Image: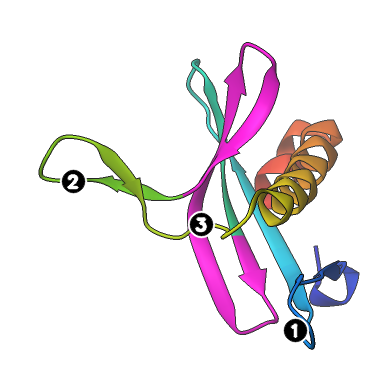
């Protein structure tokens, strides 16, 4: 996919006078092995900030995303980067899962290039 083909996704903040946050790129890497994790995704925000290692997971109620995390000293996993509110999480999830569906609908060799 060439840069000119990328769609710009706009997320609106709730704060008065808040700037728009644009998801300007979504890159999906399909996970080859069997299991609940289906893909690993990177998003670019405003062509200036990237969040890597967002996982697409198949759960009991369908697909969802898991934000990048690492294991803390107490053994629990903590998100490294995450949306502040559920509305923003829902919008990011919708954008990622729409792109995941689009990539999975492509021919297998094209999906690996997207």
- Residue 20 position by quadrant: bottom right
Q: Which residues are magenta?
A: 43-67
Name the residue that disc number 3 marks: 82
* Residue 18: x %, y % from top left: 75, 84
* Residue 82: x %, y % from top left: 51, 57
Q: Is residue 30 above or below residue 114?
A: above
Q: Is residue 25 above or below residue 54?
A: below
From the viewer's perspective, is 78 left or right of 74? right
| Disc 1 residue crowd, few under 14, some 14–19, many 20+, Cα 10 Å | few
Q: Which one is in front, 1 or 89?
A: 89
Residue reaching furthest top? Answer: 60
Q: Which residue is rendered at x = 73% and y = 46% of the image?
A: 90
Identify the image quadrant of the N terminus.
bottom right
Q: Which residue is rendered at x = 69% and y = 15% of the image?
A: 61
Residue 52 is one of the magenta-drawn residues = yes
The answer to whether the residues at label 1 and label 3 have Cβ atoms under 8 Å apart is no
- Element type where label 1 sits in the image: loop
Name the residue that disc number 2 marks: 72
* Residue 113: x %, y % from top left: 69, 51
Q: Which one is in front, 51 or 73?
A: 73
| Disc 3 residue crowd, few under 14, some 14–19, many 20+, Cα 10 Å | some
What label does residue 18 carry, if any? 1
Mark 1 to mark 2: distance in Å? 33 Å
- Element type where label 3 sits in the image: loop
N-term mark: 2 or 3: 2
Residue reaching furthest front? Answer: 16
Q: Is residue 54 above or below residue 2?
A: above
């Amino acid at each position: 996919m060439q840069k000119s083909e990328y769609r710009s996704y706009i997320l609106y903040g709730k704060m008065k006078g808040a700037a728009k946050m644009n998801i300007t790129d979504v890159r999906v890497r399909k996970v080859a092995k069997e299991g609940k994790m289906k893909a690993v995704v990177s998003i670019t925000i405003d062509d200036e900030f990237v969040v890597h290692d967002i996982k697409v997971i198949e759960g009991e109620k369908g697909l969802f995303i898991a934000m990048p995390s690492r294991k803390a000293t107490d053994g629990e996993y903590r998100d490294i980067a995450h949306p502040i509110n559920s509305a923003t999480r829902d919008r990011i999830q919708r954008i990622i899962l729409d792109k995941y569906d689009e990539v999975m609908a492509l021919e297998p060799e094209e999906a690996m290039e997207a």
